[in-house]
Image: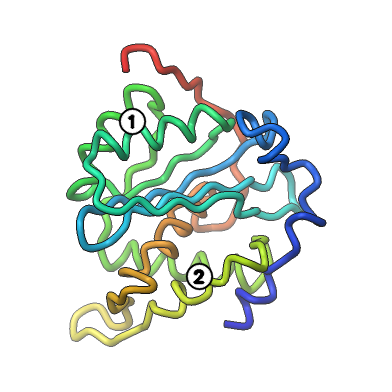
Amino acid sequence: YEWIYDCMVDSLEEWQDYAPFTYPHRPLGNKPVAIGYDPARNVDASVCVVAAVPERPGENFRLLEKHFWQGQDFEEQTQNMLDILNRYNVVHLGMDTTALGLAVGDRLERFYPSITRYDMNQDLKSQFILQARNIFQKKRVEIDFGDTDVISSFLSIQPYETRTRGLSYDSARNKDTGHADLSWAMMYLFGYEPFSGEIEQAESTIFSLDGY
């Protein structure tokens, strides 16, 4: 809990380059962002998060936007994602492409070919958890003080022992945090960096609505 709380800031004071109200169609200008997307249908809400990414050593991720889409089919979710892609210079879009995510991913890939697809399993979950823990411990992400649901979502993920794989992770579903959907979306966003923690070169992929 303390690791995440220590990453919280007053975004109005700290993020002077972010202007969602003054420039809603390009709130961060041409600065690079990463998107994490955990699609769902019916029981859980689909969650999409947007964060500014570190452009050089010493800079942090900054959580700019959170979106929760309940009960939407893949066409509606695709359109929502395209609207976000049109407002930012996206250098990474990481998403779970199992189940409903496969249909959304296939449609998005026509406009944003560089989607990073995650076919989730226990080994990959463990890697994401360890990466997120490292990022929070080193205070390499900034979250607005009002986004306390980030804390509750990560706290809902608990370790457990398995007979064959040792330590693994899972989350209990509840009405407030879903199935830890917000935290998984953030971890797909952190996938902008390899699990070694090295920063990628921020190169955007041209986004086009042609053919939609």
The colour scheme applied to this rendered structure is: rainbow
- Farthest-out residue, front: 21
Q: Tell me the residue that label 2 is attached to.
A: 149
Q: Dividing the image into 4 quarters, which one contains the N terminus?
A: bottom right
Residue 186 in picture, x, y percent from top left: 48, 58
For the residue pair 159 and 28, the one nearer the viewer reads as 28
| Amino acid at the residue labelled 1 | Leu
SS under mark 1 = helix
Q: Earlier in the sequence, mark 1 or mark 2?
A: 1
Q: Position of residue 122 (x, y in %)?
A: 27, 68
Residue 104 at x, y percent in the picture: 26, 37
The quarter in which the C terminus is drawn is: top left
Mark number displayed over residue 75? none
Horizontal side, residue 143 vs residue 12: left or right: left
Residue at 45% across / 51% down in the picture?
67
Residue shown at 30% from the left, 76% from the top? 174
Residue nearest the observer in this picture, 85 or 21: 21
Residue depicted at x 41% and y 17%: 209
Give the farthest residue toward the top.
210
Q: Is residue 108 above or below residue 120?
A: above
Label 2 element class: helix
Q: What's the amino acid at mark 2?
A: Asp
Kindly report the distance in space between the C-alpha atoms of the residues bearing marks 1 and 2: 27 Å
Q: Residues within 10 Å of mark 1 (few under 14, many from 20)?
A: many
**Disc 1 marks which residue?**
108
Q: Is 164 drawn above or below residue 191 in the view shown?
A: below
176 on left or right of 2: left
User: Is 173 displayed left or right of 48 in the figure?
Assistant: left
The mark closer to the camera, 1 or 2, is 2
- In the rendered image, residue 32, in percent from the top left (x then y), is placed at 63, 36
Q: Residues within 10 Å of mark 2 (few under 14, many from 20)?
A: some
For the image, the number of numbered tags is 2
